[in-house]
Amino acid sequence: MPSNGLTVIARVKPGCENALREILNRIGNDINGKRVNASGAEPHIFFTKSRSLHFARLVLLDDPDAGPGRQRLLFASDYDGDWREHVAEVFNLTNDPDAIWGCCEGYHGKEHFSEFLRSHSVEPQAYYVAFRGETVHSIRINAYLREQLEKWVSWPQTAAVTEAVQSLTNKPQWAGRLAYGLEKGVARVGRFLADVWRVLLVLQDAFITMARFGPLNAVLGAKRIIITLGRIPLIRLINRLTFNSMPFSPSPFSSVPIDTCAALAPTVPGDEVVSTPPLVGTPPPQEDVISQNQLTLIMVIRPERLRRLQAVLASIDIYARRLAPPGSLLGISTIHTVRWLIIDDGSRLLMVSNYDGTWENYIDEFAEMILSGLDAIWENTAGYPAPGAQDVAALKHFLRCHQLPSNVFFSAYPDTTVLNIIDNKKIVRGLMGHVQRLNKERWPSML
């Protein structure tokens, strides 16, 4: 089953902001529900009981259009299976839905929960999933099998078993070797046909993008993205032939304000920075608690650059769906999922990301690997530093000014990184393939 994403944005009722923030922060700081199990009365969402949920978060967003102090509730999830099943599971995992969703406008009780989520859902313009088709169960079982294999390798008897297996595989029968060769040949033909089909789909998507947002926006947006793909020989040749390269930085010095600890403030007219929540009650969960982190950003889109931004995001979505290899987005292997959404009638850009490691390392890797891609997206927003992502200090300050702390963040495999998932799958697949080849070579008549 493919992984899917759900994004819900609902306006919070006036006067309910502080109460909802307290509930969410308490859930976020007790994601395993230990305190709830003891009392049994506190509102909670038991994410850890889910069998199909990869990631989930709840975040309180500012709502400037509704007035000062107003907020909205963001719910974002990455899940396996059907939308209806996912919504029903989220409802069943919540012991008191009214205490959470009842704080939002448009919520009319438990019996209308699915209609409420559907009416407040927002579709992303670009959505990257590191492992499409990998379920929560498959990721967990591969991690478990690798753990058991590592334990088995450490046993004293393993050397004797390995030697016996080698003695068998060193003397394969011809039928087994022939079957194995044919299997590899068929697999190569299958991969070639799949690549041809992907190219055709990319061309189809490219024509659709040009028709929707204009050829100029589509071409200029794609050019900024493929600068980043210079590691690919064909793309590197295209960049050279079209003189497509990164502009030189106008200054060797950073444009970031010297006092980075000062209160956040808009840098240009129309810019909006994230407000600081009041320091009362339960604080939100901290960063770097587990192997993974989350990032939620919201920026104001420059009106004259909306169509260009839409074309850029369409190009990213084409690459993410059609071309990106498992576990790698433009060479970055720390992102589990990331989505970009244009909200509020095209006035704001929302980014929701789940990644490995620390915030600093994540942004540094972005700036190093896909520098032009960052500029292609965020140069269309108000307040983006003039030198772009080449000024890493200014970039980080800009992101911090527009980053929202997650009140609740859940991961189904908090200690498993993208690289772990890749390695676990290779090891388990290699082990299963080895066993199958051993069976074919040793006992071909039984197959």
Image (cartoon, rainbow, N blue to C red):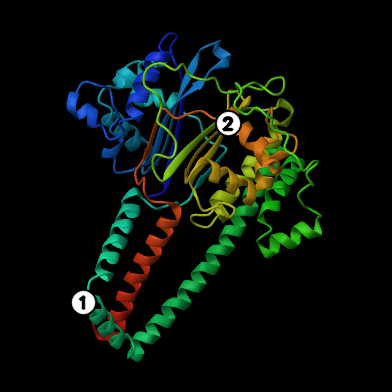
List the residue tagged with mark 1: 157
Indicate whether 410 appears above or below 348: below
Residue 400 screen position, x and y as percent? 58, 31
Q: Quadrant of residue 99?
A: top left
| Rendered residue at 34%/30% (across/down) | 29
The dot on residue 229 is: none
Whether pointer 2 and pointer 1 mark residues with C-beta atoms closer than 8 Å, the reply is no
Q: Quadrant of residue 386?
A: top right
The dot on residue 400 is: 2
- Can residue 349 be seen in this snapshot? no
Indicate whether 13 appears above or below 358: above
Instruction: Left or right? Give the position of 83 relative to 94.
Output: right
Residue 72 screen position, x and y as percent? 48, 20
Q: Quadrant of residue 51?
A: top left
| Rendered residue at 26%/65% (across/down) | 151
Residue 436 screen position, x and y as percent? 31, 75
* Element class at badge 1: loop
Residue 186 screen position, x and y as percent? 46, 75
Indicate whether 222 appears above or below 285: below
